[in-house]
Image (tube, helix red, strand yellow):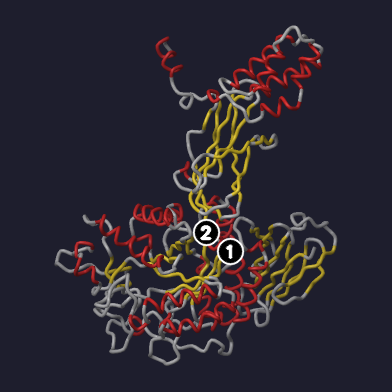
Amino acid sequence: MTNKDLTAARSRSRFEYPRLIIENVYPQLDGGRHPVKRIVGDSCRVGADIYMDGHNLIAARMRYRGPNDRTWRSVAMSYDFNTDRWNAEFPLDVIGHWRFTVEAWPDSFGTWLEELRKKVAAGLDVSVELLEGAQVITNTLASSEHPELQSAAQQLSNPKLELEDRLKVAFAPELATNMAGLVNESEITRHRHEYHLMVDRPEARFAAWYEMFPRSQGTQPGKPGRFKDAEKSLPRLAELGFDVVYLPPIHPIGISHRKGPNNSLTAQPGDPGSPWAIGNSDGGHLAIAPELGTVEDFEQFVKKAADLGMEVALDYALQCSPDHPWIREHPDWFVIRPDGSIKHAENPPKKYEDIVPLDLWCEDRDNLWRACREILDYWIERGVNTFRVDNPHTKPFVFWEWLIASIKEAHPEVVFLSEAFTRPKKMQGLAKLGFTQSYTYFTWKNTAAELRELFTELHNTDLVEYFRGNLFTNTPDILHEYLQKGGRPAFRVRLLLAATLSPLYGIYSGFELCENVPREPGSEEYLNSEKYEIKVRDWEASGNINDDIRILNRIRRNNPALQTQGNLAFHPTDNEQLLFYSRNMWRDDLLILVNLDPHNRQAGMADVPVETLGLVRDSTYEVEDLLTGQRYTWRGVHNYVDLDPAARVGHVLRVVR
């Protein structure tokens, strides 16, 4: 390197050539490109690797800024010798967008004081060291005023004072106290990145969802129920313990190419059509289907749900029927085929002739995107703070990043659930871009090996920082073979798994009645699907599993271990049909066993993680089944389990302390 190069290097910012190295800051996602997620009331624990040349001590602090902060706050970081990491944490007391970064500097005062102690203990002459201490204090103060520290510097450097008196000044606790937190700004190395946190309200991480078609809440077959009828169903859902009532699209339904029962291509007079074919002469996404009621009726429905401790989630489906007003007003917002026709939706071999997708990359996309934002604004004004987003993976990712950030800047309380049954990286990418929750592959995971693989990933990898899986047991589109063939025990098994494997889960109407008839063998479509016709149900019909739902939702609310992620562990059994896992938090220790075979009795030995639970390996201990109230005395690691699905599909055992 030439002299010219050295001169240029010295003139560069300390951020380009830092004295200290700060790396591996955690938590962070993709180098700070995307925010990690937390819940209000959490604390954010930050760790970093910090080191420098030589033997100097180091000081570090974390700087953070909440959504309402005008200036940065800071907290000192502490060093953990065992992990060689620096750590600090700060409370997250407001929902919204937070930022943090890490700063470090040579701890000149601490280094000097430590060396002085060693030399005094060794009986060495420390007169020069005392002069150095005065210099350290003076350099740290720079131009700031601090009479006590200035006096200390003068005494340390005063040769007329007795050495013993100068050492008393050096080792005085008040000197260390006054120097703590002071730093010469020119010595600070700040990490080159700011990291981001999105702090959500508690319901973003913990909630039980119920999907309900308002038009099926009436009492007369073939006649659509209205919001006033649906309002009468809310007390039942509240009593069962649900937190969120999710409604499929409530907008006017298209007439052209309207689907008939069982997705037939020809609708008969009176057939209601699919709610996902949005828009007709009565309006589009800002309108309510007249057969459901008025805007005032909907607002009353939302208020009634809130009075019962629940909230209403709406479907946000960016698609139109061929009769949507946008077709006439903005034909350039859609894909026009070479023959002049508008392209309808397809998912080969499925065809959706009654649905027309938007072209979010069209030339007039600025206006289209704003119109999509206005839909959310409109319903937020009417009390909706949760949206289930239909097929987001078929729309531009940059659109979602813009839209969600735009909404959450003004309304940080809004929750977005991604309905993206697609490849893992796409699902995870949408979560990174801002979706609060996501559907998962849970519906298709039914063996012990499949469940262990999926939930180890969701709880014990970096996904826990940003991906919140919402476990729907079924949907209007998905009736899995396990439910079709397993009967009532299968529904109880899947409910128990969903309610205890994730803080977020949901069911679609009819699950509590064990509806399980497919349209045809090998199909996951329901026979006489509610997507295309109106249903009237007896919610107390024989064989229902209402009691299971009620008990499990109560258990979830009473046990913090079931309300968070990252605290699940699987444990061995000698029978692969018995799935055994634990959920632990703040001495709330749950041991959960599930018989995955809905047809046969299964028994075997389960290996309890006694050391993790703080139990003596060969001692006896008591466990209480929260499903039944029964108590059992267990001993040591190996314990016998016997589950007959005709009577009991599993245990939720709490270790009695």
Specify whether residue 81 is in view. yes
Q: Is residue 78 left or right of residue 162?
A: left
Where's residue 226, x and y in %? Answer: 41, 84
What SS does tag 1 mark?
A: loop
Quarter of image, res 602: bottom right
| Quadrant assignment for the C terminus | bottom right
Compared with 57, 258 (above or below) is below
Quarter of image, res 352: bottom left
Where's residue 486, x and y in %? Answer: 56, 79
Q: What residue do we see at 20% from left, 64% from top? A: 330
The amino acid beneath tag 1 is: Pro
Asked if the residue under mark 2 is in contact with the one under mark 1, i.e. CB atoms within 8 Å, the reply is yes
Residue sitting nearer the eye, 41 or 164: 164
Compared with 548, 61 (above or below) is above
Where's residue 102, x and y in %? Answer: 55, 36
Residue sitting nearer the eye, 339 or 431: 431
Q: What residue do we see at 52% from left, 31% from top? A: 190
The Cα atoms of the two marked residues, 1 and 2, are separated by 9 Å
Compared with 504, 403 (above or below) is above
| Quadrant assignment for the N terminus | top left
Q: Is residue 600 left or right of residue 411?
A: right
Q: Residue furthest bottom?
A: 220
Quarter of image, res 425: bottom left
Q: Which mark is residue 503?
A: 1
Residue denoted by label 2: 468
Q: What residue do we see at 57% from left, 55% from top? A: 40
Q: Indicate which disc, 1 or 2, sits on the residue closer to the N terminus.
A: 2
The amino acid beneath tag 2 is: Arg
Q: What residue do we see at 70% from left, 18% from top? A: 152
Residue sitting nearer the eye, 200 or 476: 200
Q: Residue furthest right?
A: 619
